[in-house]
Amino acid sequence: MSLDVADARVALNFALPPEREAHEPPEARGVPRDGVAMLVSRAGAGEISRHAFTALPRLLLPGDLLVVNTSATVPAAVALPGGLAVHFSTPLPDGDWLVELRQAGGPATVPHAGGSPGQRLELPGGAVLTLARRFTTRLWRARLSTAVLPYLRRHGEPIRYSYVSRPWPIEAYQTVFATVPGSAEMPSASRPFTPAVVAALVARGITFAPVTLHTGVSSLEGDEDPYPEPYDVPPATARLVNLTRRHGGRVIAVGTTVVRALETAARLPGGQTVEAAAGWTEHIVTPEPGSRLLAVDGLITGLHEPRSSHLRMLAAFAGLDLLGRCYAVAIEHGYLWHEFGDLHLLLP
Amino acid sequence: MCRRGPLPSVGAMTNTRNAVITGASRGLGLALARGLAADGWSLVIDARDAEALRTAAAGLPGGARVIVLPGDVTDPAHRDEIVRAAADLGGPDLLINNAGTLGASPLPAMADYPVGDLRDAFEVNVLAPIALTQLLLPALRMRGGAVLNITSDAAVEPYAGWGGYGAAKAALEQASNVLSAEENLVRVWWVDPGDLRTHMHQLAYPGEDISDRPLPGSAVGAFKKLINERMPSGRYRATELVPTGVPS
């Protein structure tokens, strides 16, 4: 681990007060989807300003490109009789899935340390999950006896952590761009986008392009790095990204998933620019020089937990100093964290 | 990072694209082989008629890497050969299940359809493509690849005489439909190429002049658009993708 990363973890090892956590969707607090707040940081000027999310069209410029993730959230949590739960995270090429075992605890679930290779778990609806072997400390490689996506549609519910005190229907976890089911957790940066906001952006001369990256379960516990995730950058999107940058426009990723997909597609062997690509990505964006941003100029994202790997990615956009100041401002001004919370626009 | 692999990494991906095309000795399969080879794809091609397949391969645009595998898609050992060959190319990005059979010719009514012929039609048109898809799916998922199943408007329209072929293509369409709901890492397309001047079409209308139908090459542009733009999974009609009669 380099000094940069260690520095980042010290600088961003802030305490997150419980009242800064969004415990429910904004609509449940009487705030429309697009009514959340947005912190804006400008890396070049070192400036921080505070806005409503609906100010986005005038914060961006005609010719800028917003790249969105079309992955739809699947109800990826399956409760077993007896208090165990399985979170389906990520499909693997051979048909296995990465899953996390959880157990009842607090208002939601907590990690379950048990499980053994070869163990068969009987799931609702007659399905059987066979654990193959551990993949990481928390994740198992496992095989379900039936097709996972259709099964989850019938028997799953949205993954929920303890800061969200009650279940919400899957619609609360879908974004306006959701098209291809596959994310274990919502690509939440695009949650506040409504048809009205999208229309205002289009009218301003800002373009949109889709990528797909199916997000696995988040790394809430410990300092785990992201694991490989399936991504897809279609040809038309690759062309638009390259065209935008060639003409001086800015490519703004809506969500860290989009950064991961585009930065992967900018690093293909033999590629000079962003190439159409699909597969699995293990690319991790950090402030280190070897990981400098090649495809993305700005980022719209939520507010991230202390010490999370996402903060390293954000530091690649804003630098550690500015990012640290942003988070101090966000805490001071009552911004809300997590998937139902407020946003942060990181501009160059 | 906590990697317990093996998982494909970015470095494993290349910019070359590899396709498996079944039934590539003539007709639409050959036209697709020509079109993809001209665009730099490497190919695994199969057909039952070894001589016709070799002649077809010899006529493909120069420079293309082509593995020629004569055989019958209903033969499990032949399917294993196809899978091995695709791996030898570096892994498949695209499987085109084009090989098909009309069933009995001239086309009998459902009332009289010989059940043995019907069974053969399902073996070739339904079970073989499903089996080949199953074998190639892990590699296709790894590369974000696609499955393209050739279907027909006979799968949905009640054309007299086309009951055996149409029922089999309908089964292939629904298999594709379900596959697309289960698989979110590969594209699944099932495409009606439209009436084309092919050997199979001639078999359906023995002795008739079918020269008013467009040549199979005319549909290739539509397929290239679908493949190159990696359009979303679903059913497509070639005529809706690009105007008919536009050369590829």
Image: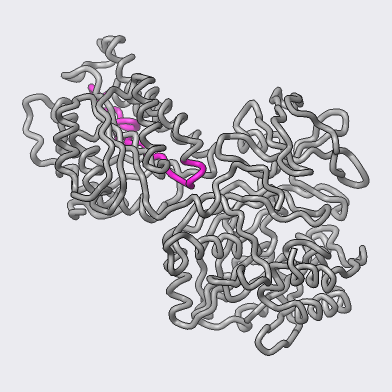
Would residue A27 be found to the left or right of residue B237 on screen?
right
In the rendered image, residue B147 lying in the magenta stretch gets the answer yes
Residue B194 picture quarter? top left
Percent from the top left, x then y, of residue A133? Answer: 71, 33
Residue A213 lies, with reference to residue A302, above or below; the image says above
Is B29 displayed left or right of A139 in the figure?
A: left
- Percent across and percent down for residue B24 are 24, 35
The spot of residue B151 in percent (x, y) is 32, 34
Check the image and name the residue furthest to the front.
Answer: A2
Q: Residue at x 47, y 76 (%)?
A: A244
User: Dividing the image into 4 quarters, which one contains the C terminus of chain B?
Assistant: bottom left
Q: Residue at horizontal 43%, vertical 69%?
A: A272
A296 or A178, nearer to the observer: A296
User: Residue pushed farthest bottom?
Assistant: A45
In this picture, which residue range is highlighted in magenta?
B140-162
Residue A286 part of the magenta segment: no
Q: Residue at x 68, y 40 (%)?
A: A98
Query: Where residue A220 appears, x then y in whole percent?
Result: 81, 54
Residue at 78 percent across and 62 percent down: it is A308
Left or right of A335 on screen, residue B37:
left
Q: Is residue A9 visible?
A: yes
Against A80, residue A273 (above or below) is below
Colour mode? one colour
Residue B154 against residue A331 in the figure, above or below = above
In-front residue for pair A39/A37: A39
Task: Identify which residue, A156 or B16, lies in the foreground.
Answer: B16
